[in-house]
Amino acid sequence: MRTVITMHRDDTEWQRWAECRGISRDRFFPEYDWAVDPAIIAMCDRCPVREACLEFALNTDQEFGIWGGLTEWQRQQITMTRSRVRCPDCRSSSVIEEGRFEVCLSCGLSWPV
């Protein structure tokens, strides 16, 4: 059974358990998505902190590289979907609808729907 480690969104302690620690960063930042090394994706697939890595990348808007086993393009697809239910200011998912507005419960920002 695989152990999954998740952390608070601002915590980077999860990096201590990453399968990729000690591997050259260059392997995770190919020039093109189609040039991704399949061995890197396989490493991510068995990594116990894959989900924390992906959450970190999405929450901190990492534009480049492989994070949580996903390419830049794959993360952009997730971000486009997530941005509809997250606060545009603090990125919190604690958003409710009040009348014709969405309101962030974390920072108080509101915007028309």
Image (tube, helix red, strand yellow):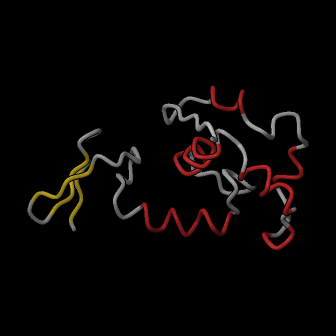
Near-viewer residue (86 or 34): 34
Whether residue 36 is situated above or below residue 53 in the rendered picture: below
Q: Residue at x 71, y 53 (%)?
A: 45
**For the C terminus, which image quadrant?**
bottom left
Instruction: State left or right for residue 66 relative to residue 36.
Output: left
Instruction: State left or right for residue 105 relative to residue 26.
Output: left
Residue 75, image quadrant: bottom right
Near-viewer residue (20 or 88): 20
**For the N terminus, which image quadrant?**
top right
Query: How many numbered dots are placed on residues in this image?
Result: 0
Instruction: Specify the farthest residue to the bottom.
Output: 34
Instruction: State left or right for residue 2 relative to residue 80.
Output: right
Q: Residue at x 71, y 43 (%)?
A: 47
Residue 101, image quadrant: bottom left
Whether residue 79 is situated above or below residue 110 in the rendered picture: below
Instruction: State left or right for residue 89 relative to residue 97.
Output: right
Instruction: Specify the farthest residue to the front.
Output: 1
Question: Residue 104: horizontal and vertical position, in percent?
Answer: 26, 47
Q: Residue at x 86, y 57 (%)?
A: 39
Q: Residue at x 77, y 57 (%)?
A: 41
Question: Residue 26: horizontal and vertical position, in percent?
Answer: 89, 50
Near-viewer residue (68 or 12): 68
Question: Residue 66: horizontal and vertical position, in percent?
Answer: 74, 55
Question: Residue 82: horizontal and vertical position, in percent?
Answer: 43, 61
Whether residue 113 is situated above or below residue 45 in the rendered picture: below
